[in-house]
Amino acid sequence: MKPPILIDIPECLTAPRTLVRPYRAGDGVGMFEAVDESREHILPWMPWGPGHQTAEDSEKLVRTFRARWELREDLPVGIFERESGRYLGGSGLHRIDWEVRSFEIGYWIRKSGAGKGHVTETVQLLSKLAFEALDANRVFIRCAAANEKSAAVARRAGFFYEGRLRNGIKDARGVLHDTLMFSLIPEDWERAAPRGLRLEL
């Protein structure tokens, strides 16, 4: 297998309404504004929210995300409105096992960007990236059983429900929740891959 750091990965992923790309220096301002707008919206599911106290905190994070992307340790991306370029939230391919070619998709969206299809398009774009550019054998999504909106995204994107893991996740308040597990494998993607998605280096 080619060392992951030598894999060229498309950096511009586009769907009809959504642009997904790795973070760049300067993205911290948009990230901070999105988090600050959405603290109650993303909590308790995103315990990192309180860590964004200033735009500088967010800028440090996006630069760390970029470094991890370059090293292929993690593949975090920002979600942007395609037409305006407005920062909407974060996603990525995480918990990567390069031997198995297994990737987890996580996601969050700012309050004012929710309910417009951007997260579903993001999940479809990252699935395309994983299966068509990174030779994935498995892509999965986990979410707390009580997080109905997150589970709905997985279902809309065509992910197969694998089961429920009891006491599988803690929220920001330390409360245990059951975890729902969804996945795609190559055969699923071949059957259900949507049109209108583009990957560009």
Image: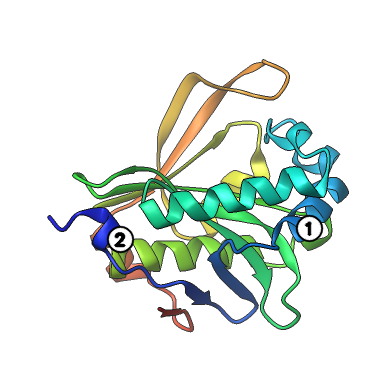
Q: Give residue 188's mark.
A: 2
Mark 2 or mark 1, which is nearer to you?
1
Where does residue 175 sit, x and y in percent of width and height?
67, 16
Q: Is residue 180 visible?
A: yes
Q: Residue furthest left?
A: 1
Amino acid at circle 1: Val
- Name which residue lies at 79% across and 54% down: 34
Which residue is nearer to you in this view: 184 or 68?
68
**Tag 1 residue:** 29
- Name which residue lies at 65% across and 41% down: 148
Q: Quadrant of residue 136?
A: bottom left
Amino acid at circle 2: Asp
Quadrant of the frame with the N terminus: bottom left
Q: Give residue 170's mark.
A: none
Where does residue 157 sit, x and y in percent of width and height?
50, 60
| Residue 117 horizontal side relative to residue 187, left or right | right
- Name which residue lies at 77% across and 62% down: 113
| Residue 125 horizontal side relative to residue 150, left or right | left
Secondary structure of the residue carrying numbered label 1: helix
Callout 2: 10 Å neighbours few (<14), some, many (20+)?
some
Q: Is residue 136 visible?
A: no
- Name which residue lies at 83% across and 38% down: 53
Q: Quadrant of residue 110?
A: bottom right
Which residue is nearer to you in this view: 28 or 120?
28
Distance of mark 2 from mark 1, alpha carbons?
38 Å
Which residue is nearer to you in this view: 21 or 46?
21
Quadrant of the frame with the C terminus: bottom left
Label located before the other in sequence (2 or 1) = 1
Where does residue 173 sit, x and y in percent of width and height?
73, 19
Where does residue 114 sit, x and y in percent of width and height?
76, 58
Q: Is residue 179 above or below residue 166?
A: below
